[in-house]
Amino acid sequence: MNRKEQLINFSFVFPALAIFSFFYIIPFFYTFWLSLHKASSTNVLDLNFVGVRNFKDIFSVQIFAALAGILGISLIVFAFKNKFKKLSSKRKKSLAKTLQIITIAAGGAFLVYSIGAFLNISKQALSFSPDLQWWNSVRRSFYITLWGLTFQNCLAFLLALGVDRAARTGKYYRVIFFLLPVLGEVIIGLLLRIMLSHYPGVFNHLLESIGLGQWAQNWLGKDMALTTLAVSHCWRGFGYGFIILLAGLQTIPEQLYEAAKIDGANALHRFTKITIPMLIPIIFLVIILTILGTVQIIGLPMALTRGGPAGRTTVSVLRIFEDLNNSHVGYASAEGLILGLILVTLSFSLLKISKKIKS
Amino acid sequence: MRKFFTFTIILLVCFTLTGCGESRQETGPTVTIWHWMSDRQDAFEQLAQKYKQEKEITIHFELFPHSAYTQKINAAEAANDLPDLFGILGEKRVLASFAKEKKIEDLTPYMEAQDSSWKERFIDICLAVNSFKKDNIYAVKPGIYGVPIDAMSIQFLYNKDLLEKEGFALDSPPENFQDFLAIAKRANDTKDTYGFASGWGETWLIYCFTTNYAFDLMGEEKFLNTIKGEVPYTDPDWIKVFSLFKDLREEGILAPGIITMNNKEAEQIFATNRALFTFNGSWGVNTYQQINPQLKYETMPPPKANQKYPPGIWAGAGTSFVVNSRSENKQESIDFLNWLTEAKQQVFLIKETNNLPSIKGLKKDTPANMGNFLDNQQYFTHPRLWRINENSRVVEAINRGVQNIVIGAKTPEEVAKEVAKTKERYKNE
């Protein structure tokens, strides 16, 4: 391929590459760059370079040093495993050697940093002080995710199974169940706030009128707020899982069930031996989408509780939003990167598990 | 097919080119103003029309959602694309940042021209919140950097009908905190009526209440010394401040769900005669008027918890506009602000938007309910007037702590310790 052809080919890819870089790659690196800065206390427009201080504040110096150590050891082990030797040609081999040396050097640097940090910690007797507000917000996000993975997805699966069999009315159910996700988080949040708050307290009033007054309580109070938020999120979001699982169910060939029936398989056997195995990739897709969607909720808690009472429903993305509003741009960027890293790690782990189960 | 593609491409190019053009066919300069006040857009547009007729200058008010406004301004600042006039939300350090970077114009020379006639027009505190004094901690060149177009104050209000029902004289609301608790408790004994309601789901109202009483219990100097880090939050006076919330809780006078209640919900409760006392800003007049035009209420100074120091009442400019120092229409923008803060336009804004005027001498034109918010001026203060402001992390810890006291999850002492710990953690920021 000559240079002209290469240029022509590249010109076809260029628009997509430019858009992708502008909207994804540059913001990612810019966020990373911002995470290494802190706004001055007297001038919020003036960002000062502080290195990894924001990450240290979030993790605490001890955990950050330990993470650096683990990363250092991982890089060195990876380099010595000789993965680079798989490359064949002479030119590639010399490149592999260079990459190996760079990886070992980087690993060594992280390890040295880690040892230095630990020595400094013991010398200064630094106390262990991770940002508990942030980690609590992450914990809350994962609590809601747990509800999403169990209650929301089970509900979606059961409904999808039911609707899959309802040939005539299926399309109506599909519309009804998908109505809630179509409505915005904020609309649902505001409606539920009117229903669940003390004043006017429609839900409590309803309970009293049907003789279940003893169940009436402050649904947005200190004990119930997070669970109320989790259930509200599941109620709003099960439609997504429902549609995907229903689509998955409808791709399973009917002949498989007929053959199993002829072989004498009962309903439970058909479900466990055909439906579930055939749906595994879809189930994992729904799990990953649930995790990504739930950990990143912000509109619903903002409208329903504003993160209260006393921060009990402040989830991770809401925390990042609050930090941004308080001009902690660098800190919020660091929090965003950590959350992103957690989500990416989780998603890849789940994909790997899914592949293993499939194989 | 080829013809079709050619035609489509020509059509797209035409659309793109026409889209890039200026849509308004106007003569003379256009002053663009960015703001977030959806309730005032109509009134602003009417004023813009009037100004166009009088001065032949087009004023274009552009409205953005409140939640996205700060991000919009920050993005425009970074892109060097700020409008001619805009408002700045947030702490004084944000205003200071814009002033320091010379993004906004120092208006002192314009205000002081013609024997300071423009400057003299304003209620002092409204102008003070937009000004920087000599040797300010932000190192901003002393001057006036914003023009207040209205005013606000956040006060205790009492429902006159309910107070009378409880057997108290209308002109003598409780003067001290103990009487306040006792009267509020009696109101609470009536079914579906609460002693006190406020939108404490919006945490800034909690900080406002807390600082009012910090002024009362320890004086302004000690309060500011705490922010400076010279007095710990575990000081007995601070414990007393936090204990006031414990008293409110223990007396059972708070409306249920007060710490998840937003300001609008609290306003509804007060407007429907369901709360004897409330703590709210002058903007609440609008809601009270809409929900219950018959509502009789009055402002009162914060019931004192201490006789030694005066309490604080947050007051100042409700909304201020600043001038983009790089604007091509700088003079036109300043002239418009001058016109907007003339008595005639201020009276129009009072009537149309139910907000307090930022200039003196208009109490007679202000409806009585609203005018009450101009009372108790001897206690007026505002974070933008303090020589130092608390770190937002510490403010957050105070607000969260107070909410925990109100729901009975923590004691004042525990909260004081937590706030002190947060202060220690962020002392170098």
Image (cartoon, coloured by chain):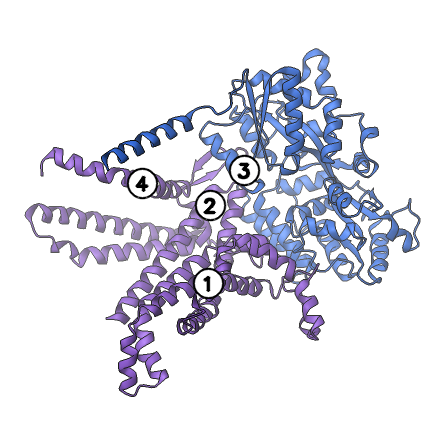
Chain colours: A purple, B blue
What is the secondary structure assignment of the residue under circle 4?
A: helix
How far apart marks 3 and 1 lie (CA) works out to: 34 Å
How far apart marks 4 and 3 lie (CA) works out to: 26 Å
Q: Which of marks 3 and 2 is in front?
A: 3
Marked residue chain, label 1: A
Image coordinates of residue B399 in percent, x first then y, are 64, 51
Which comes before the other along the chain, label 4 or label 1?
4
Q: Mark 4 points at which residue?
A: A21
Q: Which of marks 1 and 2 is in front?
A: 1
Residue A200 or B356: which is nearer the viewer? A200
Pick the quarter of the image with the N terminus of chain A.
top left
Image coordinates of residue B417 in percent, x first then y, are 62, 55
- Left or right? Give the position of A317 relative to B35: left
Residue B150 or A236: which is nearer the viewer? A236
What is the secondary structure assignment of the residue under circle 2?
A: helix
User: The residue under label 2 is which amino acid type?
Assistant: Tyr
Picture layout, residue B325 above or below residue A61: above
Q: How crowded is mark 3: few (under 14 residues within 10 Å), some or many (20 or more)?
A: many
What is the secondary structure assignment of the residue under circle 1?
A: helix
Tell me whether circle 3 and circle 2 mark residues in contact (CB < 8 Å).
no
Tell me whether circle 4 and circle 2 mark residues in contact (CB < 8 Å).
no
Q: Which of marks 4 and 2 is in front?
A: 4
Which comes before the other along the chain, label 1 or label 2?
1
Residue A129 makes an appearance in the image = no
Q: How crowded is mark 4: few (under 14 residues within 10 Å), some or many (20 or more)?
A: few
Q: Name the residue under label 2.
A: A331
What is the secondary structure assignment of the residue under circle 3?
A: helix
Q: Name the residue under label 3.
A: B70
**What residue appears at the point 33 percent right and 43 percent down from the top-left corner?**
A25
User: The residue under label 4 is which amino acid type?
Assistant: Ser
